[in-house]
Amino acid sequence: MMNNMTLNAIPVLTIDGPSGVGKGTAALRVAQHLGWHILDSGALYRVLGQAAIKHGVAFDAADALEALAQGLEIEFLPDSHTGDTRIVLEGTDVTQAARSEEGGKAASLVAAIPQVRAALLERQQAFCQAPGLVADGRDMGTVVFPHAVLKIFLTASPEERANRRYKQLKEKGIDVNLPGLVKQLVERDTRDSQRLVAPLVAADDAIQIDTSHLDIESMVQKILTALHTALQHKGVVSSNQGSQ
Ligand code: C5P
């Protein structure tokens, strides 16, 4: 188990926000630039959704889902062909199903259960390893890493987010239609924002960035600049060290 000393000593950058806002891509690029570890917390909820389907557990069966979450046998493996991460559940590759919009819906249903969130908390905190961690999700800055050195909250209009998601899914060969995607995205955001535990909300001390008119490169640069300033304030880097 991570103790508070360990959690406080290693710098964490949290990137939260609604679906399709570009969190995953931004987090990956920032982590690669810094040489830090990455936590895609949504993937954990997505895998749990797949585990529930595989084991015939209903999405509202709190006790059974808690037990599944506690024993979740999951691996994240690099995919040399696509450069993406392969998601492996109990030895089976479930990447496609987990990353689909249906997979997102299953994730958001199981994620609304407080016992499930509690069961996955330490597993997420264990990703906090030197030299640092970039964590993306919905409650990274509010619940999982409240001590983060910098908290970013990304926003963009639902139409823009659905468009980005559409392109992303098409590129991965996943068949989707745009109007259906907007509807699913809004439904998922509503459920994520209105749940009682760890709802989708910006931390009080988060920096909010509207990404509607930003390309990924500008987004990454803004985050890196903000991080450099935050690390300077904490005395982690000296003011004459460059951010690049
Ligand atoms: O980020 P991603 O779209 O992969 O997340 C899938 C779902 O998992 C979200 O819609 C949300 O319900 C849930 N989630 C969460 N808390 C997180 C990350 C994801 O509840 N930190």
Image: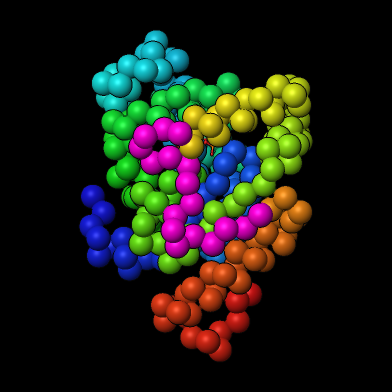
Q: Is residue 206 magenta?
A: yes
Compared across the picture, whether 158 is left or right of 120 comes to right
The residue that appears at 57% across and 58% down in the rendered structure is: 208
Does 125 appear above or below 36?
above
Q: How many marks?
A: 0
Which residue is more in the foreground, 101 or 170?
Answer: 101
Q: Is residue 114 visible?
A: yes
Q: Which residue range is magenta in the image?
A: 194-210
Which quadrant does the C terminus fall into? bottom right
The residue that appears at 37% across and 18% down in the rendered structure is: 60
Q: For the stretch drawn in magenta, what is the main secondary structure?
A: loop
Does 205 appear above or below 127?
below
Compared across the picture, whether 175 is left or right of 96 comes to right
Provide residue 56's location: percent of width, then percent of height: 39, 10
Q: Quadrant of residue 146?
A: bottom left
The residue that appears at 25% across and 65% down in the rendered structure is: 5
Which residue is more in the foreground, 193 or 229?
Answer: 193
Provide residue 52's location: percent of width, then percent of height: 41, 18
View extreme (top): residue = 56
Q: Is residue 46 visible?
A: no
